[in-house]
Image (tube, rainbow, N blue to C red):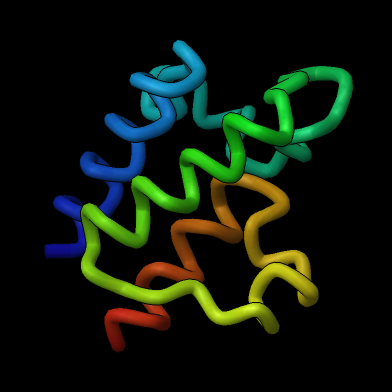
Amino acid sequence: MKENISNKLNEIFLKRTGINFQKQPQLKEENLLGKKLSIPPRELVMICADIEREFNIYIPETDYIDGNVKNYAKIERMIRRLLKF
């Protein structure tokens, strides 16, 4: 299941941004809205909606405030936590 989470999350990002984090793991800690990745904020909103739909979870407001959607690695950890993995 853990590998399945990684694959599904990567598919969401690949569809929305064209970035394949599995082929470029060095980008997983980069700020999604930063200069290196430059993902538009509206795309990040859509990515979060896709994540909620795909994993059947709700991302609490506190996760946004605490920066848990700042980069790919944090999002993956957040999903695992919300799914209790």
Q: Is residue 27 left or right of residue 59?
A: right
Q: Quadrant of the N terminus?
A: bottom left
- For the point 35% across and 20% down, which residue is it? 15
User: In the image, 4: left or right of 47?
Assistant: left
Image spot of residue 5 (x, y percent): 24, 55
Please tell me in which quadrant of the rendered image residue 61 appears.
bottom right
Q: Is residue 52 left or right of residue 17?
A: left
**Which residue is nearer to you in this view: 82 or 57?**
57
* Vertical placement of residue 73 versus 20, above or below: below
Seen as rendered, the residue at the extreme bottom is: 84
State which quadrant residue 28 falls in.
top right
Q: Nearer the viewer, residue 21 or 51?
A: 51
The C terminus sits in image quarter: bottom left
Closer to us: 11 or 46: 46
> Residue visible at 28% across and 80% down?
83
The percent position of residue 6, horizontal first and vertical second, equals: 29, 47
